[in-house]
Amino acid sequence: MRAAVISQGSISSRMIADELKRYFDAVDMLDIKEFEVSLGGKEPQVFYEGKPLSKEYDCVYAKGSYRYVSLLRSLTTILGQKGYMPIKPGAFTAGHDKLLTHIMLQTANVPQPRTYVVSTADAGKKLLKKIDYPVVMKLPAGTHGKGVMLADSPESASSMIDTLALLKQPFLMQEYIETGGTDTRAFVVGDEVIASMKRVAKEGERRANIHAGGKAIQAEIDEYSKKVAIDTARAIGADVCAVDMLIGPRNKPVVIEINLSPGLQGITRASKVNVAQKIAKFLYDKAKEFKVRQAGLVVKQATESEFITHLDFRTSRILLPEQATKLSKLSEQDEVVLTMDKGKITIKKFGEDK
């Protein structure tokens, strides 16, 4: 089997690629900046280094910063038809936008700090009269703690709002939860938290991000915190990700962010877990499972109209496989009758039995 890691070439990506070589017959490291997507023909085309991507992959682990969201979503939508993708296409849009992340967490009933979305300076300043201090202010996009500010007073908050308003885009105002300058990161792979750590901010800094000078230390989290992290990953649509939480005085976690392209060095050192190896083994098992399902699909289609597959959940909606559309011969113009029961959905064209 063949696997690919699409990334910006970070150390963490190379760590995963090296571990993948223990399981897959071939592993390619591909630079996200060298990809192009062509649309409008009979089928979409993916180009790498100016040439059509000729290789087919049983697994593609695509990751990158918010600057490449559209490209990552396009690539995984196209390449995901032939191989396993640990991150669903829509997750790149939601996971790289803090506002969309919080909306999806709200929909999934995942605990999070009280958060306000503000679009103008006037609206933000009116809100200042109703909230407690300090208050956290965030830009919708940004990583490594960039675009996150803390206002200790109405005066400093007002000044920050004036600055944010110049960007002419919505911003977030969020309640501050005192944790002593720490946050907790849970690394989710599949249905399991494989490693966790606490990040401690450097002196004089309240952001605990490693890139902001924070220090990673070993930390075990309780079962409820693990469940919150796994629920967060499911809500966003990621089988591999890091979930950042604040665990306040009452020992109850609230999610502040999800990271689809997390660094591995800090959590590997802190947790003493070979995170890259755990990811690689999971990707291999899922790729094998995907391949078996695809093979079974071809055999069954020749004799009957049933096949085994996983459902593709888009937030709270189910997207049926392409084969279901082809076999059912239903069109957008058809009216249908849906019959639903636990573990079963039947779709029938309206009036077909008359």
Image: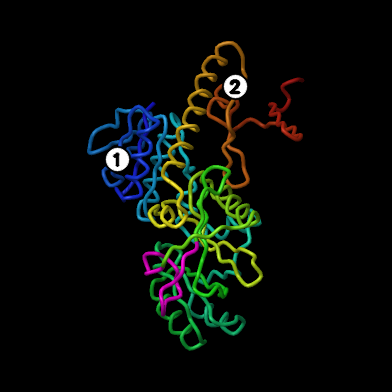
Report which residue position mark 1 lands on: 30
Bounds of the magenta span? 198-214
Res. 127 mark: none
Residue 104: give x, y in percent of width and height: 58, 55
Task: Indicate the secondary structure of the residue bearing disc 1.
Answer: strand
Across and down, in percent, residue 99 comes to 51, 62
Front-most of residues 128 and 105: 105
Q: In the image, which is nearer the foreground, mark 1 or mark 2?
A: 1
Q: Main secondary structure of the magenta part?
A: loop
- Residue 66 highlighted magenta (yes or no): no
Mark carried by residue 307:
2
Looking at the picture, tell me which residue is in the foreground, 293 or 67. 293
Q: What residue sits 45% from the left and 31% below the top?
A: 81
Q: Can you name the residue that lies furthest to the top here? A: 303
Spatial separation of the CA atoms under disc 1 and disc 2: 33 Å
Q: Can you name the residue that lies furthest to the left here?
A: 50
How packed mark 1 is, by other alpha carbons closer than 10 Å (few <14, some 14-19, many 20 or more), is some
| Place of residue 197 in the rendered image (x, y in percent of width and height, measured from the top left) | 49, 59
User: If you read the primary sequence from the N terminus, does the residue marked by circle 1 or circle 2 appear first?
Assistant: 1
User: Residue type at mark 1?
Assistant: Leu
Instruction: Please report the residue visible at 58 percent of the width from the left and 59 percent of the height from the top.
Output: 103
Q: Is residue 225 left or right of residue 162?
A: right
Residue 82 is drawn in which quadrant? top left
Kind of residue at badge 2 = Phe
Q: Position of residue 100 (x, y in %)?
A: 52, 58
Vertical order, 147 against 17 (above or below): below
229 shown above or below 127: above
- 286 over 92 or under it: above or below: above
